[in-house]
Image: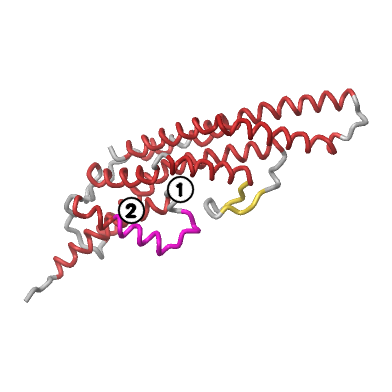
Amino acid sequence: MVTIGSELMQSWVLGLLLPLTRILALIAMAPILGHPTIPKRVKLGLGVILTLMMMPTLPPMPAIEIFSLQGLLVLVQQMMIGLAIGFSMRLVFSAIEVTGQLISMTMGLGFASFFDPQTRAQSTAISQFLVILALLIFLSLDGHLIFITAISNSFHVIPVSLDSLNMDFMKIALWGEIVFSAGLLLAMPVIAALLVTNMALGILTRTAPQLNLFGIGFPITISVGFVVLALSLSNMVNPIEHLISVSSDRMLQITK
């Protein structure tokens, strides 16, 4: 008769629970997998499947008591590692959203906003369009496989242990500069074109004061903005691919 003791049962639970915590934290922060429209059961099922696939290759889990302060600290540690890996890729899409916000405000479409369930904040239509474009580029570059590679490598580079977490979170915070620098650079063609347009409208208003600036200004700026955005979309693909590649390298650097 086969008997299963409490220690064996606890080792099985730890072997599943600790890796699952790190993987679920990554899924919650990942750009596509963490979207609120994806049911929680799907996210949990995906996390369990990935955990079961990785369990045979994982290092041995530490012998700790599950219902103890030490066990809680280890769970929090695994959650922080998963969130850090997903956050490094989330920065790219935040930069794309900043690009859309800058373009919308410059064009005069800042009022055309709606609630974004991903960020739980107001977002413009152009921001959502550019984010969808970035998501398609991300999938074309096998970004979802990069996530799986990064989380798998993390268990070997930063194994589950009782030691203190050795991660440079300040470096991860400094990577946030990509949100503003990349967002401004991507929006620069449209901003420059609209700046010239507004200067021309200002000169026209000074030379012909009888013209209604508010009547002709907004249609012109919106039209110029859409035209320049359409012409610059093909040139945005390479910078977005570069941002995704850089963020992928940084995501893998976290686990090195």
Q: Quadrant of the C terminus?
A: top left
**Secondary structure that dominates the magenta span:** helix
Q: Of helix, strand and loop, which one carries label 1?
A: loop
Residue at point 42% right, 50% down?
Answer: 29
Image height check: is 134 above or below 20? above
Kind of residue at disc 1: Pro
Q: Quadrant of the N terminus?
A: bottom left
With 15 as the anchor, is 79 left or right in this view? right
Identify the magenta region: 35-50
Residue underneath mark 1: 31
Image height check: is 171 above or below 64? above
Residue extending farthest bottom: 1
Tell me which numbered mark, 1 or 2, is placed earlier along the sequence: 2
Residue at point 40% right, 64% down?
Answer: 41
Residue at point 43% right, 35% down?
Answer: 175
Residue underneath mark 2: 23
Q: Of helix, strand and loop, which one carries label 2?
A: helix
Residue at point 38% right, 35% down?
Answer: 171
